[in-house]
């Protein structure tokens, strides 16, 4: 359920956790101040209520560890094998599956996902004739011109 609410009323909705102070501090990191009459959109009010009750029940140390864990768990595939083995054991214990890929596949996926255009440019420059590239550019230009003529 989506709710539109004034920023100043958030504290009345979430009694267990002071989201207004939390959001104000968060926005101040970007040099943005949130006035009380700012309208806030909350997409899933029940989820926020559940999260606020969890936050109030846990110690700061547990919450800090959780945040660090969420960050680190997504970096493990890029870490040395000893860390990837630990993640594989955890995944096997929790989900009952092994998902460790070979290092070559992991590295290739990383390069393709993060530097795809640069790698494509290097590949094209190395393996395609420069005259063929020029012909493709001419064909592309002609297609663009033709599409504008018929619009």
Image: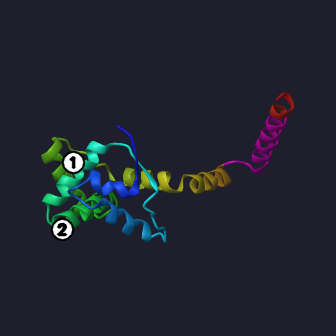
Q: Nearer the viewer, residue 55 or 34?
A: 34
Q: Are marks 2 and 1 in contact (CB under 8 Å)?
A: no
Vertical placement of residue 35 versus 149, above or below: below
Locate the N terminus and report the quarter of the image it occupies.
top left
Q: Is residue 144 magenta?
A: yes
Question: Looking at this view, is 17 or 106 the one in front?
Answer: 17
The residue mark sitting in front, 2 or 1, is 1
Q: Is residue 4 magenta?
A: no
Q: Residue at x 31, y 48 (%)?
A: 101
Question: What residue is drawn where x is 84% and y is 28%?
Answer: 150
Tally the marks.
2
Q: Badge 1 local density, few (<14 within 10 Å), some, or many (20+)?
A: few
Q: Residue placed at 76% from the left, 42% from the top? A: 136
- Residues rendered magenta in the picture: 128-145
Q: Position of residue 88 (x, y in %)?
A: 21, 51
Hey, which quadrant is residue 77 in on the image? bottom left
Secondary structure beneath label 2: helix
Q: Give residue 60's mark.
A: 2
Disc sitting over residue 73 in the figure: none
**Left or right of residue 101, residue 121 in this image:** right
Residue that carries the numbered disc 1 in the rendered image: 50
């Amino acid at each position: 359920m989506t709710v539109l609410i004034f920023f100043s009323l958030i504290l009345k909705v979430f009694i267990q956790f002071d989201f207004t102070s939390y959001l104000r501090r968060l926005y101040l990191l970007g040099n943005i101040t949130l006035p009380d009459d700012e309208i806030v959109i909350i997409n899933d009010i029940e989820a926020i209520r559940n999260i606020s009750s969890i936050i109030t029940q846990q110690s700061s140390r547990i919450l800090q560890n959780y945040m660090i864990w969420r960050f680190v768990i997504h970096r493990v595939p890029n870490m040395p094998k000893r860390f990837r083995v630990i993640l594989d054991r955890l995944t096997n214990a929790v989900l009952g599956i092994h998902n460790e890929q070979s290092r070559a596949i992991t590295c290739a996926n990383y390069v393709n996902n993060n530097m795809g255009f640069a790698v494509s440019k290097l590949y094209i420059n190395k393996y395609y004739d420069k005259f063929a590239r020029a012909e493709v550019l001419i064909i592309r230009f002609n297609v663009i011109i033709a599409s504008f003529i018929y619009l």
